Amino acid sequence: MRWRDRYGIRRLRGPRVAKFDREATDEDIEALIAFARSRRGVEFYVEPETFATDTTAVAVAYDGEWTRRRVGSPAVIGKVARDLALPVYDVQLTGYPARMRAYNERRREQERRQAEQ
């Protein structure tokens, strides 16, 4: 079955550079959309493309819960954010939100307590 370009990943990507990582797919974008629709206060943070990885986006909910997926280009997640009426930030300019770090710390502490039991 031929892969469909529902979110404009191919069209909005631009020239391709060899990578170690796989390219973004519709499933990656759909996972971000599902996360955003199932949680409150979601914001997107775009992470730049590197030699090893494609452009990614981190969706962060109001409580700091987050997920990261490949998006292919900043234009793709920009379109998704506009469609969902959610903010999108460049992580190189804004950094990650403090609530994301607090969520990670809570999870680590919870896992530590479970390991001790």
Image (tube, rainbow, N blue to C red):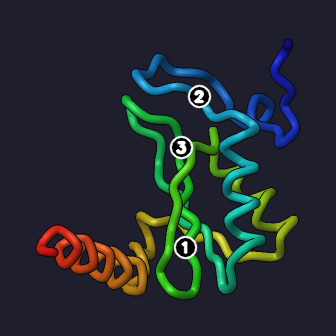
Which three-letter amino acid code belongs to the residue tagged 3?
Thr
Q: What residue is at 56 percent from the left and 56 percent from the top? A: 57
Furthest-front residue in view?
Answer: 117
* Residue 64 at x, y percent in the picture: 47, 81
Residue to which mark 2 is pinned: 23
Which three-letter amino acid code belongs to the residue tagged 2?
Glu
Q: Distance between the residues labelled 1 and 3?
A: 17 Å
Q: In this view, does 116 lie to the left or right of 41?
A: left
Q: In this view, does 6 lie to the left or right of 60?
A: right
* Disc 2 and disc 3 in contact, CB within 8 angstroms: no
Q: How far apart are marks 2 and 1 (CA)?
A: 22 Å
Compared with 81, 100 (above or below) is below
Furthest-top residue in view?
Answer: 1
**Which one is closest to the eye, mark 1 or mark 3?**
1
Residues packed near mark 3 inside 10 Å, few (<14), some (14 to 19) or many (20 plus): many
Of the residues under marks 1 and 3, which one precedes in the sequence? Answer: 3
Residues packed near mark 1 inside 10 Å, few (<14), some (14 to 19) or many (20 plus): many
Q: What residue is at 64 percent from the left and 51 percent from the top? A: 74
Res. 32 image quadrant: bottom right
Residue to which mark 1 is pinned: 60
- In front here: 116 or 61? 116
Compared with 24, 113 (above or below) is below
* Residue 75 at x, y percent in the picture: 71, 50
Q: What residue is at 69 percent from the left and 84 percent from the top? A: 40
Residue to which mark 3 is pinned: 55
Which three-letter amino acid code belongs to the residue tagged 1?
Val
Q: What residue is at 11 percent from the left and 73 percent from the top? A: 116
Q: What element carries label 2?
A: loop
Of the residues under marks 2 and 1, which one precedes in the sequence? Answer: 2
Q: Quadrant of the N terminus?
A: top right
Q: What element carries label 1?
A: strand
